[in-house]
Image (spheres, rainbow, N blue to C red):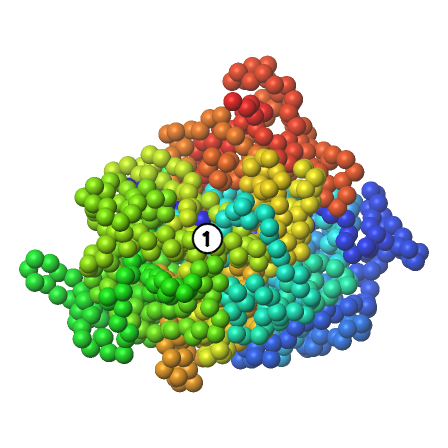
Amino acid sequence: MVAAAENEKKTAGSGPKNQQGSKNKRGKQAGQRNKNGQQKKNPNGNSKNQNQKNNNSNGNQNNNNKKKNPQGDQDGNKPTATGGAHKPNNNNNKGPAKGKNRRRNPRKPAPKSDDSNTANTKGEASKQNQTSSSPSKRKGNRNRGGNQRNNNNGRGNFRNNKGRGKSHDNIIYPAYWTLEDCLTKYNAKDPNIIRGTIRVLPMKDAMAFCTCDRGSQPRDVMLEGPLERNRSLDGDTVFVELLPDDDEEDYDDYNEGEGMEDEEEREEVVGDVDDSDSDDGSDRDDDEEEEEAGDSPSEFSEGSEFMEEEEDAFWQDDAVQVDLWDPVVNIQRSRGIAQNSSSNHENQQQRGRVVYVVPPKAYASEINPSQETKASFRKIVGTFKRLQSGTTLLTCSNKCLPQFRLSNQDAKKFKEAPDNAIFQARYDYGAWQENHRWPPCSNVVQFGQSCNIEDETAALLIENQVDHGEHPPDVLEECQTVVASGEYSNGAESGWRPTPEMYKGRRDYRTQRIFTIDPTTAKDLDDALHITDLGNGQVELGVHIADVSYFVEQDSLLDVEAQRRCTTVYLVDRVIPMLPRPLCEIACSLNENVERLAFSCVWRMNKDGSVVKGHKVWYGRSVIKSCARLDYATAQNIIEEKVAHGENENENEIDEELWPKSRRPTGGHTIEEVAADVRLMNVIAQARRRMRFKNGALGLNSVKLTFQLDGDGETPLLCKPYEIRDSNRLVEEYMLLANYLVAQRLITHAGGRACLRNHETPLYDGLEKVAAVAHVAIGFKVDIDSSEGLQRSLSRLAAECQDELVLKCITEMLKLPMKPAEYIAAGNLSPHEWAHFALNIPYYTHFTSPIRRYADVIVHRLLQATLDKTVDEFEWTEKRIGNVCERCNAKKEGSRKAQERSDTVFLALYLKKHPLKGQLGVVLSVGQKTFTVFLPSLGISILLFLDEHKDWIEFKDFTFGKGGDHPDRRIKLTRIAKKHKGEQWNELEIKFFSRIRVTCVCSEKAPIAVKLHLEGPWKEP
C-alpha cells in the first residue's frame, strides 16, 4: 500500500517581525539605550527616559490612516459571553484625529500573581472578569537593565535584560473588557479595535498575529508576546486593541541585538510550510499546487521578461496578463509588498493586544441561532510534563498551544501514569484567570500511548479539531435516499447511473473523449478533462467537475454535516471524508465507462498557452461518460513516449506496467487517441506554465513525503519525497484556469456574494531576512519587492548558481514568511484585495473539488444561480457566506496541521526501526543553542538542539562581522570528548548554509517526534 501525506503551505502566521535583531528601520537612533540601560540623547538634545515618558498622562501620538470598509458587519454577530468584565472608558470610543493628543487612563492595580492553578469552577470563571481594567493605552516602564513595566501594560513581565520570554515568575494578565463594550466600539467602526482570528507561531512565548475580519488593516496585527495574547489560544476569535505609534521605539529597541533567539524554542518541522492541495499521489487536488508554492523551473531563467508597471496600473494594462487570463474586471493592481516604514502609515504593521476572547459557539447554534449554546470548551490532548515543584502540565504536540495545568486532584490521580501515556482533557473558556500562569484543564482521561498508530491518530484529530468521526445515522439515511433513484442491479453487476429526469437541462458530453488523471489509489474522482483540436491553431478545453451540489441540497442534513466538516482530511494511512462514501466514491465520483452528472467549464485556447480573447466561456451542468481512468504514472509514460508510440500499435503488445489494461480507454476510443490528447494537453500546459512564470507567478517547490506501508497498514517500510512530474503539472494548469474563469463569472454576476480565494502578500521583514542571508552567504541579491521580483531572482539564481542545493535552501527559507490563502466573500474586501499573490492574478476561487471542499460546493451553487439569473433570490447572504468561509479556513488549517502531524508520526516510527545515519544537512538559521537543518534527502527542516550534545561538544554563539541590519550569527563547536563514535574533527563553525552530517532518529520521550543528532562536518563521498 502506498500513501502520501500532504503538507500544506504553513505560513508563519503572517511571519514574525524581523527576528534577527535589525537596527531601528525608522531611523529613531535617538531612542536607543546604551549598555547601562540609559537613554541616548536624540539629535534634538532632549532625553527620552522611559519612566518619565510612560508615566506622563499626555502624549502626542500619530494615528495611522486606516482603510474603512463601508460594507463591514455592523450587527457584531454577537457571540455568547462567559461573564462580566470591565467596561472600557467611553472617551476611547472614537480614535483621535491624526496628530491630536490622546489622553491615557491609568490602570487599576492588578491582583497578585498565583501559579497554583486550581480546578475549574464557575466561581473562578466569574472571578476572572471582576477585576477592573481600563482599555486605555498602556503605560509603564522597561529598560535594558531589566526593569519591568507596569504589570498590566501587556508586555513587561516577559521582558528583562536577557530578552523576551525569559522571566515568568510574576505574570499578571490584563483584565478583559466586556463583550458589550467591544461590540459597541467595533460596530461604531472605532479604528482602534478590531476583531479577528489569532494565529500563534510554534515557539515558546512566541509572537502571534491577528487577521482583521473586515479588512480595516492592510496587514495582520502583531501580538508580541504572551501578555499581548492575553490568555487567547491559537485559532480563537478575539477583539484586539491597537497600540499607539509612540510605543514603536520600545519595540525596535527591544528587538535590537536579540538575533534569532526564538529559534531555540522552535520545534522540528516535518515537510515544508505549504498551503497547497496538489495531487501528490495522495488522492488530492491539482488546483492549488501554485496557490502559494509550485515548482520553479530553471529553464524559465533565460529570456524571462517582466512587465514594469506604475503604481496605479490596472491588471488589464499588462499585455501578458491579458494573454494568459483575459481579465474582464478592471481592478487596480497593488504590485509591491508592504514594508514597515514610518513614512508609510497605511501599510505599516500595527501592534495590538487582546482585550476579549470570544468563546466558540456550538456549531448547531451557528445553523440555528435560536438554539441555546452550551458552555464553550476546547478538547486538548498531549503528554504529561512533571515539574520539580510538583506541578503537572499537559504538553500538546501542537506547539502553537500553551501547556495546560492539571488540578492537584488530577495530578495526584495520574501520578503513576507512564511517561508515554496520551491524555485528553478539556479547557473551558473563561477559566484562565489573570493571575494564572498556565491555563487550567479538567476532565482529564488517559486514552492511549505514544507510538501507537491508532492512539496517535486519534490524538492528532482531536488536537486539530477535525475529529469528525463517522457520519451520523440520519445523515447516512438521507444520503441513501438521495442516491437511491439511480441505483441499479441486474444480477451480474450493480452500481449507480443518472435517471432520465436528471438529464433535463444538461449538455450531453457522453460521446466526447473525456478522461481522468488522478493518483493511483484515488477513489473519489472529482475532475475530468477533454481537448479538441479545432485545426486553426486553437483547441477547445473542457474541465468537468462532479456535480455535488445537485445531490447536496442547501441546508439539508447532508449539507449541515458537510458544513461542519468543511474538508476531507487526508492522513498517511486513512481518509476522513467530508461526504458519505456512497456519494463521494460512487454517485459523484467520475468513474470510467459510466454516466455521471457534472458541472462543466469549457473555453478555447491557443496552442501557445494563451486564451482566445473575446470567445464566450461556457458554464453549465452536463452529463459525461469518462472513457479512461489514467493515473499520473501512466500519463507520464505517455508524455515521455514510453508507450503508445504511434498508429497501428497492437494493444496486446503494450507493457502492462507502462499502461495497465484497467486504465485503457473504453467506449470505442483508442489508446492512440487518448495518448495524442494527453500529449497535446501537455504541450499547451508547458507553454502556458512558462508564460505564467515569466509574468510573475511565484514558484516555491512543495516537497511531499510518501510512505510505503506494510500489510498491516501501520508499519512504514519506506519513506521518501514524492516527485512532482509533468503529468501533475498538466492537470494543475487547466484546474487553475477553470478556477479563475469561474471566479470571474461570480464577480461579474454574483457581486459581493462571490466566494473567492485570496492570497495576501507575505511579511516584508521575513523576506528581507532571507534576502540578507542570501547576500551575506553567497553574495546574491534577491528582489523581494514583488512576486515578479522573487520569481525573477529564483530563476536567475538557478541559472547562475552552480550549487543546486543552495537554490533549494533559499527556496525553503522563502516559504516561512508566506501567508495562507483564504476563502472570502468578495463584498467583505476591496476589489484590489481579492488578488492572489503567488499566482499573480486579480482573483481566484475553488471550483474543481466539491467532493472534498465545502467552499467549492458554495461556488457551484452560486455559479448555477448566475446561470439561472436567481442571484437576488439566493438564500445565503453575503454575511453568511463570509461566516462559512471563515469556518472553511479554520477547518482547512486544522486539516493541514493534522496531515503534518500524521507525517511526523509515521516518519518517526520509520526512523525508530531505520535510523538514517550520515545524512547531509544544510543549516538554514542559527540561534544561541539551536540551529535549523534542512535535509535534502527527505525535503524537511528540523531543529537541532545543542544541549542534547553537551556530553561531547562545547559551543558558543557569536556574531560575525559588524552585524548591520541582519547580523551573521554563528556557533563555534568544540569537541571535548577524545573519542566519540569515531569522529576526528576538533572544531566546527555553524553558519548559514554550513553542510554537516547528522543522524535522523525517533525521539526517546513522548510526544513522538523526529530528532537530529550531530555527527560532524559533511564529507563529500
Q: Pinpoint residue 125: horizontal percent, then vertical percent.
A: 51, 63
* Above or below, comparing residue 212 to residue 34 in the picture: below
Seen at 71% across and 58% down, the residue is: 340
Left or right relative to 366: residue 548: left
Q: Quadrant of residue 807?
A: top right
Q: In the depicted view, which residue is nearer to us: 97 or 344?
A: 344
Farthest right residue in view: 45
Seen at 62% across and 79% down, the residue is: 188
Q: Pinpoint residue 451: horizontal percent, then vertical percent.
A: 37, 38
Total labels: the figure holds: 1
Tell me the amino acid under the disc marked 1.
Answer: Gln
Image quadrant for the N terminus?
A: top left
* Above or below, comparing residue 506 to residue 154 in the picture: below
Farthest top residue in view: 978
Under circle 1, the secondary element is helix
Farthest left residue in view: 491
Q: Pinpoint residue 192: horizontal percent, then vertical percent.
A: 67, 70
Left or right relative to 24: residue 943: left
Can you see residue 155? yes
Classed neighbour count for the residue bearing mark 1: other residues with Cα under 10 Å, few (<14), some (14–19), many (≥20): some
* Above or below, comparing residue 453 to residue 142 in the picture: above
Left or right relative to 369: residue 817: right
Q: Write down the residue under mark 1.
A: 686
Q: Quadrant of residue 1014?
A: top right
Q: In the depicted view, which residue is nearer to us: 740 or 987?
A: 740
Q: Pinpoint residue 239: horizontal percent, then vertical percent.
A: 58, 67
Seen at 47% across and 59% down, the residue is: 608
Seen at 80% across and 62% down, the residue is: 55
Q: Quadrant of residue 538?
A: bottom left
Can you see residue 125? no
